[in-house]
Image (tube, grey):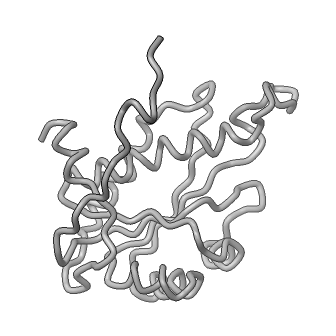
Amino acid sequence: MTLNEIFERRVSIRTFDASKRIPHETLVEIISATSLAPSWKNSQTARYYVAESQEKINEILAAFPPRNASNASGASALVVTAYVKDVAGYSREGNPDNELGNGWGIYDSGISNAYVVLKSAELGVDSLIMGIRDAEAIRKAFDIPDNQDVLSVIALGYRTSAPSRPQRKPLEEICIFE
């Protein structure tokens, strides 16, 4: 599958087939791909916590508002994404290298998360990235250390239907060439 084919295949899925489970080895392959993502000064601050058991999935679903919980129900796994604070974008002395500070840790995690959803698409696994969640409930569910911020949850599973891709903005609207 070419990279463009992966881009075309990857869309947000909001109805997952609960009867189809992702093999553990496939989840390992998906998360392992994130180690190849670039990061600020190779700091590699992205962290992942994978809810694979139905019990843990239900615990994470309880940290969502009703709409996100509904959208993610039936997912085979929920991947909690976090990053280590005060590393990416910071000097060895602990000072921000520029005005963005921890924004670089979030930026790097976004790139790493893109690797999760694109590798998933390559392997035929569908995804949905969600940011509306109770971060403290998720922190408690996985005992995530205080030096990490919870960013998002990526639902992984298999679609029940093919959604249509929303209209994309034209290049002229998002880019200026001079």
The relative height of residue 45 versus residue 61 in the rendered view (above or below) is: above
Residue depicted at x 25% and y 70%: 22
The relative height of residue 65 versus residue 22 in the rendered view (above or below) is: below
Quarter where residue 159 is shown: bottom left
Residue depicted at x 48% and y 79%: 68
Outermost residue on the top side: it is 178
Residue depicted at x 37% and y 84%: 73
The relative height of residue 174 versus residue 158 in the rendered view (above or below) is: above
State the residue in front, 84 or 109.
109
Is residue 49 toward the left or the right of residue 74 in the image?
A: right
State the residue in front, 16 or 40.
16
State the residue in front, 44 or 115.
115
How many badges with numbers are in the image? 0
Is residue 57 toward the left or the right of residue 121 in the image?
A: right
Q: Position of residue 75 (x, y in %)?
A: 33, 77
The relative height of residue 144 versus residue 10 in the rendered view (above or below) is: below
Q: Position of residue 151 (x, y in %)?
A: 61, 59
Quadrant for the N terminus in the image:
top left
State the residue in front, 174 or 130.
174
Residue depicted at x 20% and y 86%: 19
Is residue 82 toward the left or the right of residue 29 in the image?
A: right
Q: Position of residue 142 (x, y in %)?
A: 61, 73
Q: Position of residue 112 (x, y in %)?
A: 47, 44
Quarter where residue 86 is shown: top right
